[in-house]
Amino acid sequence: MKQIKSFFWGIFGLLCVIQLGVIGVQIWSYERILKEGEVYYFNVLPLDPYDAFRGRYVTLRFENTQAPIAEGQKSTKYESLGYAILEHQEKFDSVKEITFLKPQIGSFLEVNVRDNYFITTTKNHSSIVYFSLPFDRFYLREDRAPQAEKLLRVRSGVKVKAKLRVLNGKGVIEDLMVGEVPLSSYLTK
């Protein structure tokens, strides 16, 4: 009886260690992306709602959520995972094209391709696909959220950009930028 009890306690301890290990790996992964990832800025159309369980956050809708399919790629309308090839531009960064094969080099980000939203253009024989980026929320401290909500609702001609860090197809939102200033700094002014 005592051996069975200690066996179950051992299994319970092992499961606890595995759960903590999984959480630790996820935290390490996000921290690695924030430390080593390449920075991209994407224009967003923010809205600030409230969730009773998760707190205040900014819901992000990204501009330009369509891109051509990479040359030589064929896709069915049922593809759900794609890779956005990212490029730096003068005013803001953008998605150059979508590929359905994971790139081996370059800056790319896993995206969700929306089913049944393919447009074929006859002018240059390319297809355009609609996609959504893998993140849509940016969480704020409770005391700063009401100020951010006022700012983001009024907006008064201020451009808001998401500062993303991208590494090996994964991305993390580092901050929201109001003009050239981080949102947290902008709110303290």
Image (cartoon, rainbow, N blue to C red):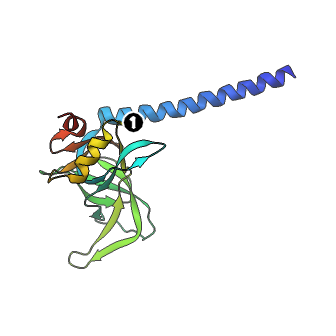
Residue ranking furthest to the bottom? 122
For residue 8, above or below residue 165? above
Left or right? Give the position of 24 relative to 4.
Answer: left
Pick the front one: 134 or 127: 134
The count of marks equals 1
Question: In the picture, residue 121 is in which quadrant?
Answer: bottom left
Q: Which residue is pictured at 55% across the width and 29% down the height?
A: 20
**Residue drawn at (33%, 65%), measured in percent from left and top?**
130
**Percent coordinates x, y for residue 69 in the rendering:** 30, 65
**Residue named by callout 1:** 30
Residue 17 placement (x, y as % from top left): 60, 27
Q: Quadrant of the C terminus?
A: top left
Residue 37 vertical position relative to residue 64 in the rendered view, above or below = above
Quarter of the image where the N terminus is located: top right
Q: Residues within 10 Å of mark 1 (few under 14, many from 20)?
A: some
**Outermost residue, left side:** 90
Residue 131: which quarter of the image? Answer: bottom left
Q: In front: 132, or 46?
A: 46
Query: Residue at the spot x=33%, y=67% of the render?
Result: 129
Counting from the top left corner in percent of width and height, residue 122 is at 24, 79
SS state under label 1: helix
10 vs 161: above or below: above
Q: Is residue 30 visible?
A: yes
Horizontal side, residue 163 vs residue 1: left or right? left
Q: Position of residue 106 (x, y in %)?
A: 27, 47
Residue pictured at 17% horizontal, 39% vertical:
181
Figure quadrant of residue 64: bottom left
Q: Which amino acid, by three-letter code, is at mark 1?
A: Tyr
Residue 164 is at least partly visible in this image: no
